Amino acid sequence: DPKIIQKPKYLVAVTGSEKILICEQYLGHNAMYWYRQSAKKPLEFMFSYSYQKLMDNQTASSRFQPQSSKKNHLDLQITALKPDDSATYFCASSQDGTKSYEQYFGPGTRLTVL
Amino acid sequence: QQKVQQSPESLSVPEGGMASLNCTSSDRNFQYFWWYRQHSGEGPKALMSIFSDGDKKEGRFTAHLNKASLHVSLHIRDSQPSDSALYFCAASNMGYKLTFGTGTSLLVDP
């Protein structure tokens, strides 16, 4: 059974629209993260949450907003979508956000903005 | 400039051969290093971590860390076709935020 669920797997959006990427983890972890993988670029850290509190935000734009309604959920809302936002977005989790525990990654949501 | 650089960009080895991947960091604050593997269409999966100078062996995989030179390497012996994937070096200084390298694409020819 998948331990980290991301929905949807593929997403196509038009420029200017808004989308929400869903992430749920069933590993009992207390820390969750979002990363982005664009073509020809390394995986890029976006956010980290620990015990449902924002720990770090490395995105330059307020168009990206994480939302944590439950301890094991961390969704990503993206507003005013741009073609440059096209990428695969990975959710990850770890036991704790304060130490270097292994981060487990979900299968990703591939977003294409037209 | 990327804080974590990997080489080579791509690598091809015969089945049963040895694959050697390299990673160099430009940030001396990085204390923790990981190797992740990503198969096509999947998320990255941790292979192993290395936090102390020296070698660490896990099965067919051996990682080496030299903190003085900020160099990490991964050696895969007896390479298998299933090892064909993207390999990422990742580093962190506080544990939670991983900075990923540029990646090495490994192809193991059967």
Image (tube, coloured by chain):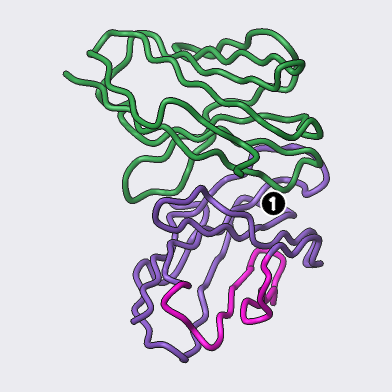
Chain colours: A purple, B green
Between A43 and A24, which is closer to the camera in this rendering?
A: A43
Horizontal side of B80 relative to A13 (left or right) equals left
Span of residues in magenta: A59-84
Horizontal side of B72 relative to A11 (left or right) equals right
Task: Please name the residue shown 79% across and 30% down the image.
Answer: B28
Residue B81 appears in which quarter of the rendering?
top left
Task: Please name the residue shown 39% across and 56% down the image.
Answer: A39
Please, is residue B51 above or below residue A19 in the view? above
Q: Which residue is mark 1?
A: A29
Identity, as a three-letter code, of the amino acid under mark 1: His
Give the image location of residue A49, x and y in percent: 75, 61
Task: Please name the residue shown 81% across and 67% down the image.
Answer: A53
Between B78 and A27, which is closer to the camera in this rendering?
A: B78
Give the image location of residue A66, x and y in percent: 66, 74
Write down the chain letter for disc 1.
A
Please, is residue A80 above or below residue A45 in the view? below
Q: Quadrant of the C terminus of chain A?
A: bottom left
